[in-house]
Image (spheres, grey):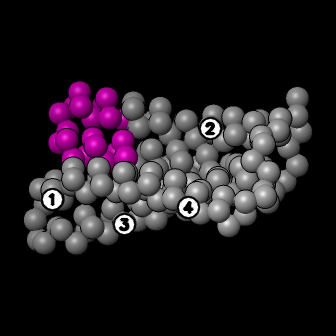
Amino acid sequence: MTHEEKRAWIRLVVAVLGYCAYVAVIANRIDGRALVGVPYAGVLLWTVGGAIVAAIVAEIGVAIVQPGASRVKDERDREIGRLGDYVGQSFVIIGAVAAMLMAMAGWDRFWIANVIYLCFVLSAILGGITKVIVYRRSFPLL
């Protein structure tokens, strides 16, 4: 497994676990009130920040455990990274358009913020899955 494939796995797992943690905390805070009344902003920011830190720490941990592993990106790594990023970016666009439409329709900020966060997570998941699948299969260079 290449270093870049390990990074893809780390980011994929962190994205899923981070969002699951966010949903669990928000679900525990409902306490009989409407979902839009749940304080979410702090949890969202801490979850995003925690996921970033967790991914960095995990990548450093992998580098420490396998110090001799090649961290040189070859053409295949660059192409796979580009493909995964292109595939994942579709959800960023979907989230931006959805948030814009929700704002124009006057939806509550809770829903707008959460659709943006969900689409960022889906972007990371879809991009990560794409990278992992392409690393596991052949990838013809053009």
Q: Residues within 10 Å of mark 3 (few under 14, many from 20)?
A: some
* Amino acid type assigned to the residue bearing label 2 in the image: Asp
Instruction: State which quadrant residue 74 falls in.
Output: top right
At 73% from the left edge and 60% from the top edge, which residue is drawn?
A: 67
Helix, strand or loop at label 1? It is loop
Q: Is residue 80 left or right of residue 43?
A: right
Residue 24 counted in the magenta span: no
Residue 102 counted in the magenta span: yes
- For disc 3, the marked residue is 21
- Distance from disc 2 to disc 3, alpha carbons, whole Å, reads 24 Å
Q: Earlier in the sequence, mark 3 or mark 1?
A: 3
Q: Earlier in the sequence, mark 1 or mark 2?
A: 1
Q: Nearer the viewer, residue 117 or 5?
A: 5
Q: Which mark is residue 58?
A: 4
- For disc 2, the marked residue is 85
Task: Tell me, yes or no, if residue 9 can be seen here.
Answer: no
Q: Residues within 10 Å of mark 4 (few under 14, many from 20)?
A: some
Q: Which residues are magenta?
A: 98-117
- Distance from disc 1 to disc 2, alpha carbons, whole Å, reads 33 Å
Q: Earlier in the sequence, mark 2 or mark 4?
A: 4
Task: Please tell me whether the stretch drawn in magenta is mainly helix, strand or loop.
Answer: helix
Task: Tell me, yes or no, if residue 66 can be seen here.
Answer: yes
Q: Earlier in the sequence, mark 4 or mark 3?
A: 3
Q: Name the quarter where the N terminus is drawn.
A: bottom right
Helix, strand or loop at label 2? It is helix
- For disc 1, the marked residue is 38
Q: Nearer the viewer, residue 84 or 115?
A: 84
**Tag 4–tag 1 contact (CB < 8 Å):** no
At 68% from the left edge and 67% from the top edge, which residue is drawn?
A: 65
Q: Name the quarter where the C terminus is drawn.
A: top right
